Image (tube, helix red, strand yellow):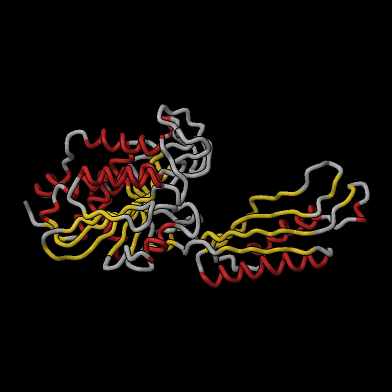
């Protein structure tokens, strides 16, 4: 490693403490998707204090910061999401959520803090930059249609040559970085099925059209979409996650509601699964004299990492933490609207290890006791900076 690279890695005094403070403030003040008013204001104010950026608010709850060097060059976008989830926090942390029923249970508070720290490091050497670094502090990753598509439509990606994002990952130990080539995250579609029958006395089921019995058959038969209607080599998940019906032990309800998700990678598999799901609902409802309502919402596109860019980011990760700490991660069936940016420019998305069982940090994402090892924040911030160093041209000091 060159002497100039070593100098670029030096952090200003107190930045690590500031990084943790940013994260803890955000964690204590979570806001739901499309409602990140105070979060966006906080981020904008922090960037104003850092200085050197052209700031804009493409939507009421997002912030974009452009760091434009004195010489022409290419443009790299770095993205962090900012929204929280409708979960009641149970961590007992001193900085736990002060907003009842809302929690940063997916690490977005850490993503935002990491990008703020990277902003401070990058702004300090703006005068040596060729081109532009565009920091995207995005709203509403958790709720389709998502904030990414809104920002793309607001021209935030215009002129961008590459886009890079990170996600804290509790399933990886702190100190590791997970890299995926090609498919990384699935398209997360959602469905709602309403079965309409004819209610009645539970002691006289022959006088009713039993929506619970019909719904149970639908749940059972939906499993055939994966096990019998889909090529075993194709990746597909169909999960029913809600079944709501009835209010009494002796009343057959006249309606039942089923909700769930379909996760896939291939577009043909995605469309075939939707059609099979509808066919099963139609057939079972018709066979038992029931009516139905069917609502199917297409979620985000799959996250598919650009191979050439991923190779560069893997090199950056190895330089940062060493080859033994960089792992290749398989595709997962979670969803991420980072994919919207990848429709506009080559992009890659990596996982930053943040789990630590020795510290009791073992709960999965979206759990009310979810937390991450704050030592991961420095790794994420440094990787953002290293990506900029490798992809853009810099004058030597």
Most extreme residue toward the bottom is 268
Number of disc labels: 0
Q: Going 71% across and 49% down the picture, which residue do you hit?
A: 244
The front one of 369 and 98 is 98
- Position of residue 379 relative to residue 338, above or below, is above
Vertical side of 339 occupied by 53: above or below: above
Horizontal side of 33 relative to 75 (left or right) equals right
The spot of residue 294 in percent (x, y) is 67, 64
Position in image of residue 147 (x %, y %): 42, 57
**329 or 364, nearer to the observer:** 364
Q: Give coordinates of residue 375: x percent, y percent.
A: 32, 36
Residue 256 horizontal side relative to residue 323, left or right: right
Give the residue drawn at x 37%, y 39%. Answer: 26
Q: Quadrant of residue 296?
A: bottom right
Q: Which residue extends farthest left?
A: 397
Specify whether residue 38 is in view. yes
Q: Nearer the viewer, residue 328 or 21?
A: 21
283 relative position to 332: left or right? right
Please name the residue shown 62% across and 55% down the image: 260
Q: Residue at x 41, y 47 (%)?
A: 36
Position of 284 relative to 140 (above/below): below
Let me know if residue 307 appears in the view: no
Q: Nearer the viewer, residue 7 or 204?
A: 204
User: Residue 396 in the image: x percent, y percent?
Assistant: 7, 54
């Amino acid at each position: 490693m060159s002497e100039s690279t070593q100098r670029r890695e030096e952090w200003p005094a107190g930045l690590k403490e500031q990084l943790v403070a940013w994260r803890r403030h955000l964690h204590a003040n979570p806001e739901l998707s499309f409602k990140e008013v105070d979060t966006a204001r906080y981020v904008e104010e922090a960037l104003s204090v850092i200085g050197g950026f052209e700031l804009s608010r493409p939507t009421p709850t997002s912030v974009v910061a452009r760091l434009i060097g004195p010489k022409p060059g290419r443009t790299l976008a770095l993205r962090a999401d900012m929204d929280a989830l409708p979960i009641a926090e149970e961590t007992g942390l001193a900085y736990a959520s002060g907003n009842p029923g809302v929690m940063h249970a997916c690490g977005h508070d850490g993503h935002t803090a990491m990008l703020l720290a990277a902003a401070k490091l990058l702004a300090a050497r703006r005068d040596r930059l060729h081109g532009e670094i565009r920091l995207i502090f995005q709203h509403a990753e958790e709720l389709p249609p998502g904030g990414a598509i809104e920002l793309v439509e607001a021209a935030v990606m215009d002129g961008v040559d590459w886009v890079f994002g990170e996600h804290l990952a509790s399933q990886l130990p702190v100190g590791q970085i997970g890299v995926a080539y090609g498919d990384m995250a699935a398209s997360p579609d959602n469905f709602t099925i309403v079965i309409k029958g004819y209610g009645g006395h539970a002691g006289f089921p022959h006088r009713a059209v039993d929506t619970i019995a019909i719904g149970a058959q639908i749940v059972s038969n939906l499993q055939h979409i994966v096990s019998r209607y889909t090529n075993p080599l194709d990746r597909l998940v169909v999960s029913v996650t809600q079944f709501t019906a009835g209010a009494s032990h002796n009343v057959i309800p006249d309606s039942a509601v089923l909700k769930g998700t379909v996760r896939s990678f291939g577009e043909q598999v995605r469309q075939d699964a939707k059609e099979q799901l509808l066919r099963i609902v139609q057939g079972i409802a018709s066979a038992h004299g029931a009516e139905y309502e069917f609502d199917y919402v297409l979620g985000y596109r799959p996250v598919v990492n650009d191979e050439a860019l991923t190779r560069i980011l893997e090199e950056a990760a190895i330089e940062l933490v060493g080859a033994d700490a960089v792992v290749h991660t398989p595709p997962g069936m979670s969803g991420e609207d980072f994919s919207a940016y990848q429709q506009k420019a080559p992009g890659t998305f990596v996982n930053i290890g943040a789990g630590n069982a020795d510290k009791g940090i073992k709960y999965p994402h979206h759990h009310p006791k979810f937390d991450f090892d704050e030592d991961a924040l420095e790794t994420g911030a440094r990787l953002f900076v290293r990506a900029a160093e490798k992809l853009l041209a810099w004058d030597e000091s």
